[in-house]
Image (spheres, rainbow, N blue to C red):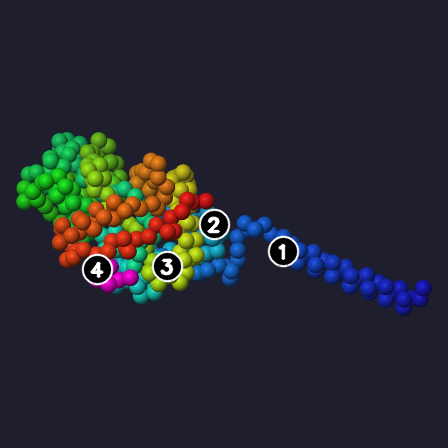
Amino acid sequence: MSVRSIRRVGLFLLIALLVTVLAACGDDDNDKPSGEAQQPADLTQTSIQFSWVHNVEFAGFYAAEQQGYYRDAGLEVRLDGGGFDESGAFIDPVQAVLDGKADFGVTGAHVLLTKRAEGAPIVAIGTIYQRSPVVLIALSESGIARPQDLVGRRVSTQPTNATVGLAYEALLAAQGIDRAQIQETMRTDFTSNPLFTGEAEVLAGFVTTEGVQVRQRDPEANFIMVSDYGIDIYSNVIFTTEDLIASKPDMVRAFLQATLKGTQWAVEQPDEAVDGFLKTYGQPYAENREVHLLGMQSSIPLLVPAGGQPGMMSEDNWAFTHQTLLDLGLLAAPLDVEAAYTLDFLGAQE
């Protein structure tokens, strides 16, 4: 064989080798496990506007992001904290969704109903807390342990259109207690200070926030949970627009199911859920890990009550909320409450 022939054979062999290597590389890409994370370019972009600043109340969303549940569902989700913007204006999650700044939002069931009465085409698809987090707190030496003990006492609460104020007024009405016999003050902060300054003998707040603050200073403080008296107005439903439900039902389902999977994970691993939140969204509060862990632990029975699953809503609860709003004059007329929520996306979690 001539030198030229040898070189030609060698060239053919080299080309064949390169083809084989390239084909092998291509096979590696095609043989990726089906559960392997998709690349960002392949993911559907979506977002949610929270009702308040980043905190463990939204642990299920953080877990869904950090555990890869959103990515597994083909989504890349932007989690927008609420509270107040740089100008000091309150960030309204309903308006944010209506304006197209977010696909999903979190708000109270009472807010959703009153907004629908004003014509807002929004629908609840699930809830974060299934039981109300609203609690009436009194120091251990107060002797206040039941709703009837509020008569003649100083109570610090919030306006009727706020979750806390609404639940407090609904409790008084259900228990037949005359508000005129209670010395009420309205507060604008979210601390437990009024109890310890003597401004109030009873503080209406969330068991997951003010309740944790009080228990750190008075472990034997008395808690009156409004849910123990049948007041279970959903404090934070997950909602979207009628249009998104009609046009992208698969995305709505994927988002909610991944979120609820994250919620279940957070309930089963509260320590890890808190650490994940602090690492990504709670750096300014890292020194208060114990506070956030206590808040997470106190959330568990609200997130997934015994015998339940994350996100579930009930017809009775929505009907009760509707009637409460009518009774307190927050709705001028009845509305079609069944159109305000859907259970269609709340199938059994995988």
Does any portion of residue 104 appear in the rendered image? Answer: yes
Q: Is residue 172 left or right of residue 90?
A: left
Q: Which residue is mark 2?
A: 68
- Tell me the number on the disc at residue 245: 3
Count residues near mark 1 (Cα–Cα under 10 Å), then give few for <14, some for 14-19, many for 20+. Answer: few
Image spot of residue 43 (x, y percent): 48, 59
The outermost residue toward the right is 1
Q: CA distance from mark 2 to mark 1?
A: 21 Å
Q: Which residue is mark 1?
A: 30
The outermost residue toward the bottom is 4
Quarter of the figure that contains the N terminus:
bottom right
Q: CA distance from mark 4 to mark 1?
A: 52 Å
Image spot of residue 187 (x, y percent): 16, 49
Image spot of residue 338 (x, y percent): 27, 53
Q: Which residue is mark 4?
A: 117
Q: Earlier in the sequence, mark 4 or mark 3?
A: 4
Q: Earlier in the sequence, mark 2 or mark 3?
A: 2
Does any portion of residue 61 appear in the rendered image? Answer: no
Disc 2 marks which amino acid?
Answer: Gly
Marks 2, 1: nearer the viewer: 1
Count residues near mark 4 (Cα–Cα under 10 Å), then give few for <14, some for 14-19, many for 20+. Answer: some
Disc 3 marks which amino acid?
Answer: Ile
Q: CA distance from mark 2 to mark 3?
A: 24 Å
